[in-house]
Image: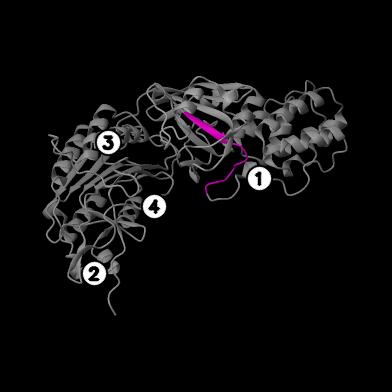
Amino acid sequence: MPRRPLNLAIACFVLILGTLLGVILVATDASAAKKALVVGIGRYTNVPPLDGPADDANAIYDDLIKFGYNSTLLLDDDVTSNNFNIAWSNFLDDVDEGDDVVIYYSGHGVEIGGTNYIVPMDVPSPDRLGTERALAGALIPMPKLIDDLSERHARATIWILDACRDNPFKVSQAGETKAIGASAGLVIASAPTGTFVFYAAGLRETALPRIKGDSSKNSLYTRFFLETLDNMPGSPVNEIAVAVREKVRVKAMPHQQRPAYYDGLDGLWCFQDCSSRTIAVALNTAAQSIEVKGITVEKGLETGAGTAIAALSADQQASLQDEKTTNAVFLGRRSLSSGCKEDGGGNDRYPFGCDFLKKIVAKNYVSILKRDVTPLTATNIRRGPPIPDLAGMLKYQCVVGTLKPADTVVLSSITEAHEGDETYYWGSVQGRARDCDGSVIPEAATPSGSVNEGIDDPRLKTLTDKLVSDDTTTRRQARNELGKYIAGAGDPTVEQLTSGIADKSYRYQLGVAVALTQRKTPLPDSAKKDVESLVSSTRDETLLSVTRKIDF
């Protein structure tokens, strides 16, 4: 039987993997040892050589030395399969628990069956390999390297891989020379929590090695990565990704190269101590604006958010929670609004269009919220907008779907995230509450039974039904109306409301807790026991914070 040709895509990407082990929020720390391994391969013996990896590796090596990393440099002959295995083993032996580790690689890279591989200098020729299985056995699998480092319990591990260029694997078939696999492209693989992935180009795009006539010795992506890192060493890696992407996109024109990235980090990580900054978040609906200030970020640690959020009213805290449990889409950032132009084909820097972004900046929410809107280009739907929680985290959540240009949605609110001099805008999608695994977000789950079982009061029945509505505006109105209703109601009414509350749905629990904060007299004994049972059975920070405002 003829051998099945290789079916692989060449990995034209720059990848940074930040593996955060056993912590929620990671940033560089003076107490963590900084260690780096820098690898560059250009002089391949059996596949087309590359002009530039040695220059890229030397430049990265010098930069990391400057930033205080104890660095090891491996070039060409150092990176045959055997030599790399020895060097890698020695490097692992030097990594201690709690270290910050950076690894850079420039050279050929391939993707086979969803797995990324590094191509060693002495990889056999494509004619000798011929099949995917044979090729994979001759390469260095990235998952194994990641697992090796995770076993060393480094505090943070950052991978930088500039592994693109042209397809190095070509074979002769029927008198013709054909590429084994696609000439460009990479399947964006899922990554664990605490992972950040930089890609030098988007899906099925080719990353340029250099720009014609450019005096720089470095690849286009590595050149701007170095430039940005030098200018922003105290900035989180996600901000470096955005800055590099824009520089590369503009410089590459008319060639299409728009670097992508995957953000799975739970917190901040910077190559140096993260610079101090102030974060403010504002939630805007058609009826109200809630602003959370006083969150200071210094050396990667966010402080003050718990106090800032707890100082809000119970209803405002619940409104923030509404948006954290509703899926969201990115709408754009303020700095782009002044120079943007409407593009009928769409632009993922402002997916709903330039005019739409300008309305947001002008706070013209009436023309945007609670009505059908359609993006001009495909955009990711995330689990929720980046709203800080009581632990002081400003979280960018996982991707749960894609909104296509033909899709129509309703936005219930606009979230502004102010970081430094930039403002990012997100829209909460009405009626969507998908979790990272595809299930319904637990706090948004529909109750299995009747929410008002045991309630005889007709008015209470109506209001408690609205507490669990998928419409955020309906829930907010119901919370306020319920609070006013029970403020002057007798004990039996309150007891009906709290009976069995620990077993009710989250939206019911939060709505009743908010309403109880408006009652000016202490709870009757049975209601007090019901609420205390709820408090002892939940770990939800918002629910606990709201119940502290109840007069027991």
Mark 1 burial class by Cα count in 10 Å: few <14, some 14-19, many 20+: some
Looking at the image, which is closer to me, 130 or 42? Answer: 130
Q: Amino acid at mark 3?
A: Val
Q: Residue at x 18, y 67 (%)?
A: 176
- Residue 245 image point, x, y percent: 31, 36
Q: Percent from the top left, x then y, of residue 12?
A: 27, 49
Q: CA distance from mark 3 to mark 2?
A: 35 Å
Foreground: disc 4 or disc 3: 3
Sequence order check: which comes first, mark 4 or mark 3?
4
Q: CA distance from mark 1 to mark 4?
A: 29 Å
Q: Are marks 4 and 2 in contact (CB under 8 Å)?
A: no
Residue, disc 2: 130
Task: Provide the secondary structure element on which disc 3 rests.
Answer: helix
Mark 4 or mark 2, earlier in chain = 2
The answer to if 431 sits in the magenta stretch is yes
Where residue 315 sits, quadrant-wise, is top right
Point 31% across, 28% down: residue: 234
The magenta stretch spans residue 13: no
Give the residue at mark 1: 445
**CB-based contact (under 8 Å), mark 1 and mark 2:** no
- Work out how far the residue at label 4 is from the one at label 3, CA to CA, in angstroms: 23 Å
